[in-house]
């Protein structure tokens, strides 16, 4: 464990977040190794979004410790933010701008010199196969193209970690497969650590080096997909996930947690 921590780019220990009397994240601990693809899985309302919001400096923990690339997201927000890129569930591109312009503005926000921005944009758009469409307005892109552009933009400022929150939501199987091919290629070429959430267990089983399963705010198991399958005596990660978390639909709790998160963010 100590060896894993020395190689960790994300370290979480005893992390807790309470909203009044509700404990959304309850004393969780895990680490993510530099350069790995790590899947953070859980049912609706399990605490995933709250945990990621703490990791990415959006909300402050109630207690516990966390480090992002060696930086404390609470006391060293700017340094922590420069260490990661993030692709949210909801689209965040400017559809009136071109693909190139969306990338360039992101680089400007991170004070990247013009020459560096130009080289970086060319490299990333080539990697996600959008170079030929760079001068088209984003509103003319397909859903898969927009997702690829968001991922490229998230890597624009040379982060060491990329957070992907349901990156293939709403995409058809062919586009999902292509997107994961690009993510694996970026992971390999850029040596970027990928921290992802998904409800498609087959995706996590196929691409993740390790997974952590969270439910009712607690980490209930973690390890490689194969290890979770073996420990639960099941035949797939999806079956292992259901074995660990049950088959009850969590929509009511998920709605409550979303409302609390939204209320908290509005008060900031």
Image: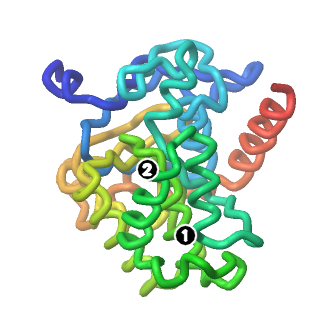
Q: SS of the residue at dot 2?
A: helix
Residue at image location 68% in from the left, 63% down from the top: 93
Q: Is residue 169 left or right of residue 138?
A: left
Front-most of residues 220 and 113: 113
- Label 1 neighbour load within 10 Å: few <14, some 14-19, many 20+: many
The answer to whether 251 is drawn above or below residue 57 in the figure is below
Q: Quadrant of the C terminus?
A: top right
Query: Residues under labels 2 and 1: Cα distance?
Result: 23 Å
Among numbered discs 2 and 1, the one appearing first in the sequence: 2
Give the x, y percent position of residue 81: 53, 32
Give the x, y percent position of residue 184: 29, 63
Name the residue carrying label 1: 147
Residue 237 visible in the current orientation? no
The answer to whether 46 is drawn above or below residue 43 in the figure is above
Residue at image location 77% in from the left, 20% down from the top: 20
Residue at image location 60% in from the left, 71% down from the top: 99
Q: Nearer the viewer, mark 2 or mark 1?
A: 2
Q: SS of the residue at dot 1?
A: helix
Residue situated furthest left in the rendering: 3
Q: Hey, which quadrant is residue 241 in on the image?
A: bottom left
Name the residue carrying label 2: 116
């Amino acid at each position: 464990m100590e060896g894993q921590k020395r190689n960790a780019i994300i370290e979480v220990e005893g992390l807790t977040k309470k909203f009044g009397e509700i404990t959304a994240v309850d004393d969780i601990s895990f680490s993510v190794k530099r350069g790995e693809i790590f899947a953070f899985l859980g049912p609706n309302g399990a605490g995933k979004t709250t945990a990621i919001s703490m990791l990415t400096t959006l909300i402050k923990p109630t207690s516990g410790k966390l480090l992002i690339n060696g930086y404390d997201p609470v006391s060293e927000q700017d340094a922590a933010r420069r260490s990661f890129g993030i692709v949210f569930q909801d689209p965040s591109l400017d559809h009136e701008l071109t693909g190139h312009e969306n990338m360039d503005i992101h680089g400007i926000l991170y004070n990247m010199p013009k020459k560096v921005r130009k080289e970086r944009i060319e490299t990333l758009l080539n990697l996600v196969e959008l170079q030929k469409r760079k001068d088209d307005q984003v509103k003319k892109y397909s859903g898969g193209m927009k997702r690829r552009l968001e991922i490229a933009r998230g890597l624009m400022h040379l982060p060491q970690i990329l957070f992907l929150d349901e990156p293939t939501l709403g995409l058809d199987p062919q586009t999902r497969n292509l997107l994961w091919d690009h993510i694996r290629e970026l992971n390999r070429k850029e040596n970027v650590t990928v921290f992802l959430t998904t409800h498609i267990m087959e995706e996590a089983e196929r691409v993740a080096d390790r997974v952590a399963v969270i439910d009712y705010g607690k980490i209930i198991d973690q390890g490689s997909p194969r290890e979770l399958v073996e420990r639960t005596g099941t035949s797939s990660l999806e079956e292992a996930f259901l074995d660990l978390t049950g088959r009850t639909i969590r929509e009511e709790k998920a709605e409550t947690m979303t409302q609390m998160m939204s209320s908290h963010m509005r008060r900031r």
